[in-house]
Amino acid sequence: MHVVLTEKDYQRPVMLASLLVALVMLVGKLTAWSITGSAAIFSDALESVIHLFATGFAGYSLWLSQQPADAGHPYGHGKVAYFSSGFEGALIAIAAISILYTAIVDLITGPELQRLGVGLWITGGLAAVNLVLGGVLVRTGRKHRSVVLEANGHHVLTDVWTSVGVLIGLGLVMLTGWLWLDPVVAILVALNILWTALSLVRRSVHGLMEAADPEETERIRTLLDRAVEKEVVEGYHQLRHRRINHEVWIEYHLLFESGMSVMDAHDRSHRVEDALHKLFPGDSVVITAHLEPSAHDEAHQDRRPEPVDVLGPQDDGQ
């Protein structure tokens, strides 16, 4: 018997693994902080606290985004993924600000450190586990066009770089005896976390506002222009499109000769639709085509402006 694995079959185990690892990270880093009293390790642990809550919300968002369309949500629930990404970014920003406050206080009052070697070993081991998990999350998210998984993966990788910064900083403290390096490293880590948070929030806004991808716009226009050149259609206008995770929604008006039969125009329209589906392999493509005669007054007028990417290039959080 041949079993076909669905998108949910791939994503749910990865999300569950992320949640379990987040819990392990939290316990491990809090233990390392209690042993050493290091502000840098505390910053790493606090980021893991936020990550645990964010991962739980991301798991719920992933489940909700995969629910089928219903009477109240005829276009599905996919946009919750962008809300989840923004929520995770906001939580990361809160963690960064908290770390900055703690580190500045330690820098002023002077840190008290102990048993740094044990803390370094714990932090290094946890960072290695997170590195593997983060890579899996990002790859799976990109493969299945899951904003939730990819955002969570970037959050995990941010945790890795945080831990690496802590390891380097505490290693220098042990070598030089300069205790002030500990809060300085925490401050640098917090700034890096804040940058990732802003990137995730920006990407969330990008998706919620349905900003058109200029590259996808060009691909669609090129195909429609080719249909005009080959005289499949007389022309087209009112092109609009948007993406929600792995779903691509495309709308346009196709123009045909006034004397053409409805059956012929319908067949030609389907040829265009089939070609558009091939432009996005692996995606769910939903097309709404309006057929109209090329002779009517508004046939060659676009009532909507060209897509403008007001947010600039999309940032993947790296």
Image (tube, helix red, strand yellow):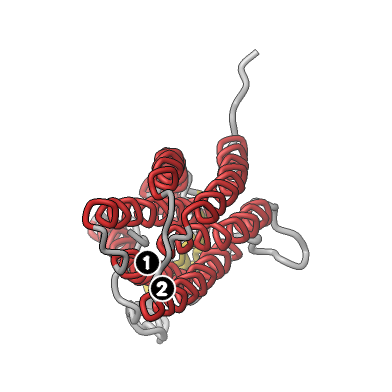
Q: Residue furthest right?
A: 71
Number of residues whose C-alpha sits closer than 10 Å to that of mark 2, classed few (under 14), some (14–19) or many (20 or more): many
Q: Which mark is residue 274?
A: none
Foreground residue among 66 and 159: 159
Q: Residue at x 64, y 59 (%)?
A: 57
Q: Residue at x 51, y 51 (%)?
A: 35
Foreground residue among 33 and 232: 33
Name the residue that disc number 1 marks.
Answer: 186
Q: Residue flagged by tag 2: what amino acid is it?
A: Ala
N-term-proximal mark, 1 vs 2: 2
Quadrant occupied by the N terminus: top right
Look at the numbered disc 2 and give the secondary structure of its residue: helix
Q: Residue at x 40, y 84 (%)?
A: 304
Image spot of residue 52 (x, y percent): 60, 56
Q: Are marks 1 and 2 in contact (CB under 8 Å)?
A: yes
Residue 4 drawn above or below residue 30:
above
* Image quadrant where residue 43 sits: bottom left
Q: Which mark is residue 103?
A: 2
What is the spatial separation of the Cα atoms under label 1 and label 2, in whole angstroms? 6 Å
Look at the numbered disc 1 and give the secondary structure of its residue: helix
77 vs 153, left or right, is: right
Residue 305 drawn above or below residue 287:
below
